[in-house]
Amino acid sequence: MMMATVNAQITFHDFTVKDINGEDYSLSQLKGKKVLVVNTASKCGLTPQYEGLQGLYEEYGGDDFMIIGFPANNFLKQEPGSNEEIATFCSINYGVSFPMMSKISVKGGDQHPLYKWLTSKSENGVADSKVTWNFQKYMIDEEGQLVGHLSPKTKPGNEKLLSWIVN
């Protein structure tokens, strides 16, 4: 008879990514905070969501809540810029002050390992999902576990999202 071994589940906090300036950003520094992970793009119909995300960050960001943006060029090449251009765009147009990471791929053969974790139940232990467009939102709890995700069209002020942040 085979005995199943319990593998220690990898959490969000086990990843290190590159920030928009190319520096290592260990997600373990976010332990104890709820984190909203959003794949972003500068030339998308949903790009104005940056404004709502920044508002959320200004109201709730800090000790208990964080937003992290991951620019991605996976959908109709709507994020063609370099990391420097993206950082400038976000700052000038939306005053973005939440952490922005280096541009990555959120789907396909070159999908970033963090997004493999976010979208694969076999890795995150919670749910399979597909990143369907720019501004899809993934909710991570204080222990680094995936809680769920919201569609790209779900605005940052959505009741379900606000309820999750404050409770």
Image: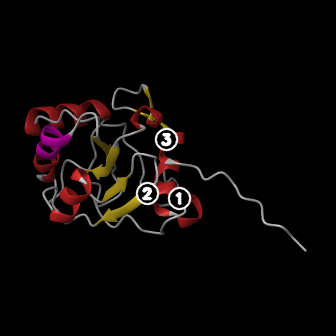
Residue 50 locus on image (x, y percent): 15, 47
Magenta part of the protein: which range?
54-60
What element does badge 1 sit on? helix
Residue ranking furthest to the bottom: 1
What element does badge 3 sit on? helix
| Residue ID for mark 3 | 13
> Residue at image x 48%, y 46%?
12
| Residue ID for mark 2 | 146
Instruction: Say what amino acid the circle numbered 1 marks.
Output: Asn
The answer to which image quadrant residue 148 occupies is bottom left
Instruction: Say what amino acid the circle numbered 2 marks.
Output: Leu
Q: Does the magenta stretch include residue 57?
A: yes
Residue 124 locus on image (x, y percent): 53, 59
Residue 23 locus on image (x, y percent): 42, 25
Asked if the residue under mark 1 is in contact with the one under mark 2, i.e. CB atoms within 8 Å, the reply is yes
What element does badge 2 sit on? strand
> Pointer 3: residues within 10 angstroms few (<14), some, or many (20+)?
some
The answer to which image quadrant residue 2 occupies is bottom right
Residue 114 locus on image (x, y percent): 48, 49
**Circle on res. 124:** 1
Q: Earlier in the sequence, mark 3 or mark 1?
A: 3
The reply, left or right, for residue 67 in relation to residue 55 is: right
Q: Does the magenta stretch include residue 122?
A: no
Residue ranking furthest to the front: 167
Q: Distance between the residues labelled 2 and 1?
A: 7 Å
> Residue at image x 37%, y 37%?
102
32 over 46 or under it: above or below: above
